[in-house]
Amino acid sequence: MCGSKGGPPVTSPRVRLDDGRHLAYKERGVAREIAKHKIIIAHAYADSKYFNFQISDEVLKELQICIVTFDRAGYGESDPNPGRSVKSEAFDIQELADKLQLGPKFYVMGLSIGAYAVYGCLKYIPHRLSGVALVVPLTNFWWPCFPDKLFRDALNGLLVAQRWTYRVAHYAPWLVHWWMTQSWLPSLSSLVGKPDPFSRSDLEILEQLASKAPTPGQGMETQQGLHESLHRDLMVAFGKWDFDPTDIRNPFVDGEGHVDMWVGHEDKVFPFELARYLSRQIPWIRYHEVADAGHLLIYKETNCEAIFRELVSP
């Protein structure tokens, strides 16, 4: 663990949770003491609090936004949580907000697989939310709300390595670590550095990002081990949940806030068909399907700005 004898050093501010674990965080934008909108963001798979948002400081100042990104349990400089779950991630967010004195309500945004933490917030702490953004959100193919044909067609449309990894995470989570560390098996590990999981627009974005200076903290995401970061993420995301998203009640029946879902039409990680179907089953979700965009849509500056503006709009 970070900060322990022989472990990686602690280089970021951290809060100590009531169970003794630490969460590392980073702030950007207007100081939280004076910001009108405080947004806590749950990062994606194999990412960290150093996620490089393509939004200018000028826009953040205009909108009076303070962004708080944090390393989810087991990632970066945050302590692992062997009991990590959809529920525990939601309460980590709530406790982070309280330790930083963000106030009785705050916004949450979940990116890709990090969206399971935000679904947890919608289920377990809806009274704390000012607004919600689900950006290219995780789809657990085994949610009961999906018709069999839709679920099977979507799963079978994925790459073999994606399909098998998700199945192992769902049906045999105790095998995930072994599966992901065997080079001869079709796992997500075999796709690292390959263009296969990305759309045309994603590849263009990756090329642009590669020409820029490396993001601070790059390479720290899994410094405490692959199992407590990547592998446990898969086990939670595609495991058996305690609820189905359609069980969630609208947290903003008074109209003071909204839930937005942003999906790329060309997304090859989580097919848009499932997100579109889910949004139709949950009519209070405001669904945004972006043409000519893939899984990395938030890395395009115009998309990123639109997402933040929509989140804090009345």
Image (tube, grey):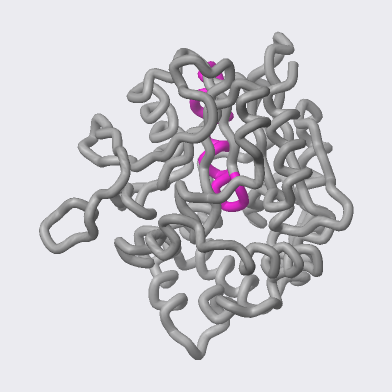
Quadrant position of the C terminus in the picture: top right
Q: Is residue 86 above or below residue 285?
A: below
Q: Position of residue 156 (x, y in %)?
A: 75, 71
Q: Position of residue 79 (x, y in %)?
A: 28, 48
User: Is residue 36 part of the magenta span, yes or no?
Assistant: no
Is 82 on the left or on the right of 158, as rendered?
left
Please tell me which residue lies in front, 254 or 155: 254
Specify the segment rendered in magenta.
111-128
Residue displayed at 79% across by 63% down: 201
Q: Is residue 203 above or below residue 290?
A: below
Q: Is residue 105 above or below residue 108?
A: above
Q: Is residue 80 above or below residue 253?
A: below
Residue displayed at 77% across by 26% down: 284
Q: Position of residue 291 (x, y in %)?
A: 88, 52
Residue displayed at 67% across by 31% down: 59
**What secondary structure characterizes most of the magenta part?**
helix
Q: Position of residue 310 (x, y in %)?
A: 75, 29
